[in-house]
Amino acid sequence: SGLVGSEMCIRDSIGTITPQTILHLHDSTNTRIQFTDTAMGAASGDGVIVGLNGDDDFFINNRESGKGIKFFTGTDDERMVINSSGDVGIHTDPARRLSLFDTDACVLELNSTNSGGTSLRIQHNHADKMFLGLAGDFILEQSSNVTDSAIRASGSLLFASGGGTERLRIASG
């Protein structure tokens, strides 16, 4: 017919007679697509599988040993990678569970509309070890919601020992 590539319009479906998009896949459960090539093989444990699991969660599973998942934007610019160990790198290869890189001075932004403020909580084995927060005051505490050090909204500096016993206060003004 002389039509090629983008000149053709095909609407097809697999598993349904009423496709909702150009290609519509439907199955009673676990609808999936598998990508393989000659180097990796074509068995059920090979390649990459994307689709819906039994709980209807969308998933991506790279089944190849030592391989991860990479996300690109723009002109083939790698933006994020999840390696085979589950470590995540944003603008960098991950060296830890989460690695961030940027050339800007601010690499991580925490923002909240919660009236309690914005905070960063650091835990070990699900127990608080450090807490940095901003709720009018900038607070640095060690554990159990006891303030060890703070810069108060009034401008005063507060230093306390473990357990919240105030040791030094420098008043503003």
Image (tube, helix red, strand yellow):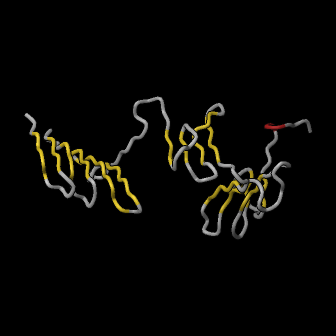
Q: Which residue is at the front of the view, 171 or 154?
A: 171
Identity of the residue drawn at 64% across and 69% down? 54
Residue 24: % across, % down = 73, 56
Identity of the residue drawn at 72% across and 60% down? 32
Residue at the outermost left position: 173
- Count of picture labels: 0
Is 161 positioned to the left or the right of 64 in the image? left
Residue 139: % across, % down = 24, 48
The N terminus sits in image quarter: top right
Residue 143: % across, % down = 28, 58
Is 121 positioned to the left or the right of 42 in the image? left
Is 87 positioned to the left or the right of 119 in the image? right
Identity of the residue drawn at 15% across and 38% down? 155
Residue at the outermost right position: 1
Identity of the residue drawn at 65% across and 55% down? 60
Residue 118: % across, % down = 31, 48
Q: Quadrant of residue 163?
A: bottom left
Q: Quadrant of residue 17?
A: bottom right
The C terminus sits in image quarter: top left
